[in-house]
Image (spheres, rainbow, N blue to C red):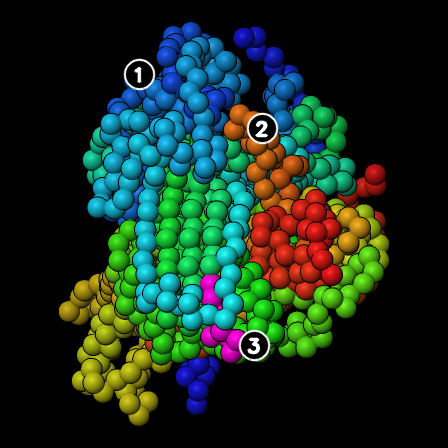
Amino acid sequence: MKRHELAKNFKQVNTSVTKIDAMQLALGKDSYVADFLPAGALVIKMLWSPHAHARIKKLDVSKAEKMPGVKCVLWHGNVPRIVHCTAGQGFPEPSPYDTFMFDNKVRFVGDRVAAVAAETEEQALAALEAIKVEYELLKPVFTLAEAMAPGAPVIHDEPEAHVPIPITYEPKKNLVAHVACEAGSFKKGMAEADFTFDETYETPYAQHCPIEPYTSMAQMTPAGRILITTSTQVPFHCRRIVARTLGIPVQKIRVVKPRIGGGFGCKQEILLEDVTAMFALRTGRPCLWRFDREETFRTGRTRHPFHIRLRTGVKKDGTITAIALECINNTGAYGGHGLTVVSCSGGKTLPLYHCDNILFDGKSYYTNLPVGGAYRGFGATQAFFAIESLMDHMAEAIGMDPLKFRQLNHIRPGEGSPIFQALGEGREGVPMTVGSNALGECIVQGAEAAGWEKRQDWRGKTGRYRRGIGMCCLMQGSSIPDIDMGAATIKINEDGSFNLNVGATDLGTGSDTVLAQIAAEELETATDKMIVYSSDTDMTPFDVGAYASSTTYLSGEAVRKAAAEAKRQILATGAEMLGVLPEEVHCEDSHVLTRDGSKKVSYSDIANYSLYQKNQYQIIGTASHITKKSPPPFAAHFAEVEVDTLTGFVKVLNYVATIDCGTAVNPTLCEGQTEGGTLNGISYALTEEYLFDGKGKMQNASFADYHIYSMRDRPPVKAILVPSYEDTGPFGAKSVSEICINGPAPAIGNAIYNATGARLNEFPFTPEKVLKAIKSVKR
Amino acid sequence: MKTNTCSVSFSINGEKKTFATRPDEKLLDLLRREGYKGTKYGCGQGTCGACTVIMDGRAVYACLLYAMQAEGRKVRTIESMGTYDKPAPIQQELVAAGAVQCGYCIPGIIMSATALMETEKDISDEVAKEYMDGNLCRCTGYEKIWVALRRTLDRAAAEPKKKASKGGKK
């Protein structure tokens, strides 16, 4: 039996059970933050900076404070000045502390100036208009070149700006981070090559566009604590960061995440909660702050734009002799995730292909533009565009089919990469060999589904509409090894149901369901016996939160361990009831049975016995999990496009996304992650971009002008789950959620080349850019 | 600031009600304030469809309409569509297909799909997509929503013809 066929024996795992909250959401029951708004809540509105870079010389809120309905105004003159980091990361964060609740300086169009809490939205908006601000305009920095230039304006000149861990951070030079490593000798590798390449690539700003915008609510509890109900991916980091920012103990705060309307990384940021909590504290009233769509675009977090230089060397036989990947990201006005995103642009891409001589250099710079953050794919998305575009280019130079070139070079099971150890997130990584890896099979199955064999060289193609097929290979990780921690508690109830309490955060992905399946599998019971409660800092154990593709792999293993502990107790009590030794019983279908099956007792009876009858105790298991590995999921994507050579319009005709996510705990949900992430990637590759005016203001901050795909736009996307078995994950699982978004930009770019001979090193592939590229093709 | 109050009367999920409002209050805000919170705010610009309700048989964006514009009309929200015991076919199919990820767009999707089914006959893929074009989803890539919708349409088509739909014509 092949290793991955183990999954066939599972009863709860590897089954598409119905997502446990699906009907609640489809019925429109109260589920999200704003649905729980108490009567008498105040509305919060923020005055945003209209300038990209300015000093606030004078700020007068006295008139606003006296306006009807206004209960409180916050600005830098009346809140604690505590430097912190808004990135919801582990502690201490691998990101600069460069943010204040309010500051006397604004650093991008959309930065905070002052906030009002009023009885109604209209009153709050009217009060904002009454706030008088005098700015001293400073020279803005809009490009990486401007940020790096000697004598460039210093965006973070405040003395408090610092990093809490020993990493490179030079705010006087606008340098947020610098990380570099070399394995082997790049120079030597280039000397060995038959062909060398030196290309540069640009990737655009993008926003996550969860349909529920950032929303946060805070209220005082009768005991004088602050209850924050918020749309977050990181409730525990939120509690810690709000406590710091307000200068109050963690103990004073409870953070609850109800259902949330999508995150994709942007809600891994503490962007609203400090202000909502401060207003609740000052006014004693419940306070709601919800971004509108324009605020979500301008002030919400974004995908870091990257400037990438990629140099490689390749031999005629297809051996890649050298790779130098140099990435510089624009982290905008604040530096959260600047380092980790650029580290992951190397760490989650370079191990994919064999090469003895690898150089990586990653930098992150401040500018006076919107702020980069965590976004599904997290740097790998940007770097894979460069790497997978150049893989095609190299294959063509040596006359090899680009698919075969990748088959020749991709990492195999049991192999490691020096990059795993060299590039961590804020510190060294962890040495690792790849366990499960079905990339080879992903390529084969994807090629067949996409009709790769019909692919023909672009030079033979004529006519106005030209079709092409492109592909790419991908990897990601599963949690941050040696850093991330998840924990879970399971206890039994009288009817044999279980409370599963997890710190893990379901942001719409279905992780509550997946974790219930894992618990049920371990406990030999049914998934619907699980009452899942997640993400409440008072009620659930700790978890770092939903990021770094960690929940199934990391929190899932914590759940499995907690379930195993509860099961041990169930077996002991069951044996006691049956009058046999614990070694003589096993669990099956919610019962404890003797080995021959002649005697059995149900979980319900065991619960009643242990709670009420004899030697009473609570059957309860708690476990934590950290990991020494971050096993990569692998994927091969294929895009077929039709390019209108008259207009430059690119239409995706067909898209195939294969993925090896280990055991698919819930295949339907895994397909959903893959289909959704892929369409987001297609939309990112073809239409999404930030358009700025000359003063750093985003011009297209609405869905009317920033186009994300609708049901009518969507091309057919076929998700193919290719099984493998990851020994270190719960029941063979590894991650699924992020990897798929990395594929469309390079796969579509390669397909455009295959259709027309036009190679674009920059996207989105708008008709204008594509047409220009087609016109410069020399046949 | 002067307070302008007025009242508006309309049928909400089959019940005639009168609400206090202001001339500048949006229908979405009134509905949510009055407890019809299944209708969601997504953009406030009439572009995402999370606030879709049915007014006199047509799917409309509640974030763009003033509450006063509902005067004398028939408004239906997600709360009228089904219960745990008796979900609507579209709700059953969405849940069964795995089409509900974060779920924030789903009430709007259901209202648009309902308007589609109550208005059109012999629904082609193209017509269905036209109706659903105004409802954005960022989680699913629409694959499973589409599967669920097509199954619901096919189910309805297979059923014996019912009398005139409730929604009225427009």
Label 2's element?
loop
Q: What's under tag 3, amino acid-wise?
A: Lys
**Residue that numbered label 1 is attached to:** A77
Badge 3: residue crowd in 10 Å (few <14, some 14–19, many ≥20)? few
Mark 3 and mark 1: span between their CA atoms?
Answer: 63 Å
**Residue that numbered label 2 is attached to:** A693
- Where's residue A227, x and y in %? 32, 36
Mark 2 or mark 3, which is nearer to you? Answer: 3
Label 3's element?
helix
- Where's residue A664, x and y in %? 47, 71
Q: What stretch is highlighted in magenta?
A: A312-319
Rendered residue at 29%/37% (across/down): A170
- Where's residue A473, x and y in %? 52, 67
Question: Is residue A89 depicted above or below B44 in this figure?
Answer: below
Foreground residue, A433 or A93?
A433
Say which chain tag 2 marks.
A
Badge 2: residue crowd in 10 Å (few <14, some 14–19, many ≥20)? few
Rendered residue at 43%/50% (across/down): A327
**Residue that numbered label 3 is attached to:** A404
Which quadrant is home to the N terminus of chain A?
A: bottom left
- The disc, 2 or 3, on the residue closer to the chain's N-terminal end is 3
Label 3–label 1 contact, CB within 8 A: no
Rendered residue at 34%/73% (across/down): A416
Mark 2 or mark 1, which is nearer to you? Answer: 2
Q: What's under tag 1, amino acid-wise?
A: Gly
User: Residue B9, located in which quarter of the rendered image?
Assistant: top right
